[in-house]
């Protein structure tokens, strides 16, 4: 069957009142335009409302993609960062909404970055920038971003992503571990909560998708160290700094 017809049927199904997934017309138009089959090997099931497994990552179902973009609320020429590029499909949908050159995507997996680049080029979205990065650290070279979409679960939003939001910006991510809920955080701290979701956890450097255990020590140590440093205020901070300075001076004299 013609892929264009399959896309129409896919979006029509998401818009059907009984399903109640998709009500944003701009998102619907974007999903009708992106050739989803260009990002998946199996054309027969590309437009079914189901997930796929590719190179150790989950390709989100169309209904989940619709929920993400409605929560993200893209506008005009927003600069967008997608953390967890995967095979590139959500980056393509974002490109339809705000333009290719306004979309930046990162992934921690080199094979997935290469796959996303190939797929986006084949689908006609060469202007999307995809780079291999630790998503928890964002993409500071191109910050600030009007919208950030984190396609992985986290108990707390990574601090780097929050600091890379522009004024009036919005970060959308699945909050939680085993139980997750889609959440949107504005740059001013305002929070919107949406439906329950299920995503894989955010990976950091040294972790491999598909393993039984994922080592989170490195990221947690950095986060705890930052919190301890920020908790020191007033005389306590000064006392610690002067003590360390005196220690260093005594060591230099020895």
Image (spheres, rainbow, N blue to C red):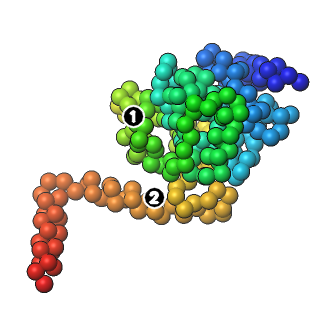
Q: Position of residue 228 (x, y in %)?
A: 30, 58
Residue 125 vertical placement versus 4 (above, below)? below
Task: Label 2, secondary structure: give it.
Answer: helix
Please identify the quarter of the rendering in which residue 42 is found. Answer: top right
Which is nearer the eye, 133 or 162? 133
Which is nearer the eye, 145 or 195? 145
Q: In the rendered image, which residue does mark 2 sit on?
A: 219
Q: As drawn, which residue projects farthest toward the right?
A: 1
Residue 76 vertical placement versus 179 (above, below)? above
| Neighbourhood count class around disc 1 (C-alpha, 10 Å): few under 14, some 14–19, many 20 upward | many
Looking at the figure, which quarter contains the N terminus? top right
Q: Residue at 40% of width from left, 36% of height from top?
A: 143
Q: Position of residue 47 (x, y in %)?
A: 79, 30
**Residue 238 is at least partly visible in this image:** yes
Q: Residue at 44% of width from left, 48% of height from top?
A: 137
Please identify the quarter of the rendering in which residue 169 is found. Answer: top left
Q: Position of residue 153 (x, y in %)?
A: 56, 46
Q: Residue at 63% of width from left, 15% of height from top?
A: 25
Number of the label disc, if any, that sits on residue 77: none
Q: In the rendered image, which residue does mark 1 sit on?
A: 144
Which is nearer the eye, 90 or 225? 90
Sooner in the amino-acid sequence: mark 2 or mark 1: 1
Q: As drawn, which residue projects farthest toward the bottom?
A: 254
Q: How many numbered dots are placed on residues in this image? A: 2
Residue 223 vertical placement versus 125 (above, below)? below
Distance, label 2 to label 1, CA atoms, is 22 Å
Task: Label 1, secondary structure: give it.
Answer: loop
Looking at the figure, which quarter contains the C terminus? bottom left
| Neighbourhood count class around disc 2 (C-alpha, 10 Å): few under 14, some 14–19, many 20 upward | some
Residue 74 vertical placement versus 206 (above, below)? above
Q: Residue at 26% of width from left, 54% of height from top?
A: 231
Q: Position of residue 64 (x, y in %)?
A: 66, 33
């Amino acid at each position: 069957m013609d892929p264009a017809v399959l896309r129409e049927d896919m979006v029509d199904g998401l818009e059907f009142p009984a399903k109640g997934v998709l009500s944003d017309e701009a998102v619907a138009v974007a999903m009708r335009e992106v050739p989803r089959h260009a990002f998946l090997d199996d054309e027969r099931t590309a437009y079914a409302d189901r997930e796929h497994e590719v190179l150790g990552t989950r390709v989100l179902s169309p209904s989940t993609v619709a929920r993400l973009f409605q929560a993200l609320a893209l506008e005009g020429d927003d600069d967008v960062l997608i953390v967890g590029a995967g095979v590139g499909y959500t980056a393509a949908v974002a490109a339809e909404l705000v333009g290719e050159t306004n979309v930046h995507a990162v992934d921690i997996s080199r094979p997935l970055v290469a796959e996303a680049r190939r797929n986006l080029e084949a689908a006609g979205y060469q202007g999307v920038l995809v780079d291999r990065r630790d998503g928890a650290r964002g993409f500071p070279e191109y910050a600030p971003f009007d919208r950030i979409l984190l396609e992985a679960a986290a108990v707390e939003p990574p601090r780097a992503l929050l600091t890379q939001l522009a004024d009036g910006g919005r970060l959308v991510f699945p909050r939680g571990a085993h139980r997750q809920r889609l959440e949107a955080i504005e740059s001013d701290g305002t929070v919107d909560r949406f439906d329950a979701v299920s995503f894989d956890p955010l990976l950091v450097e040294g972790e491999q998708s598909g393993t039984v255990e994922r080592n989170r020590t490195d990221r947690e140590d950095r986060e705890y160290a930052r919190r301890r440093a920020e908790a020191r205020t007033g005389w306590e901070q000064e006392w610690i700094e002067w003590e360390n300075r005196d220690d260093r001076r005594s060591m230099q004299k020895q």
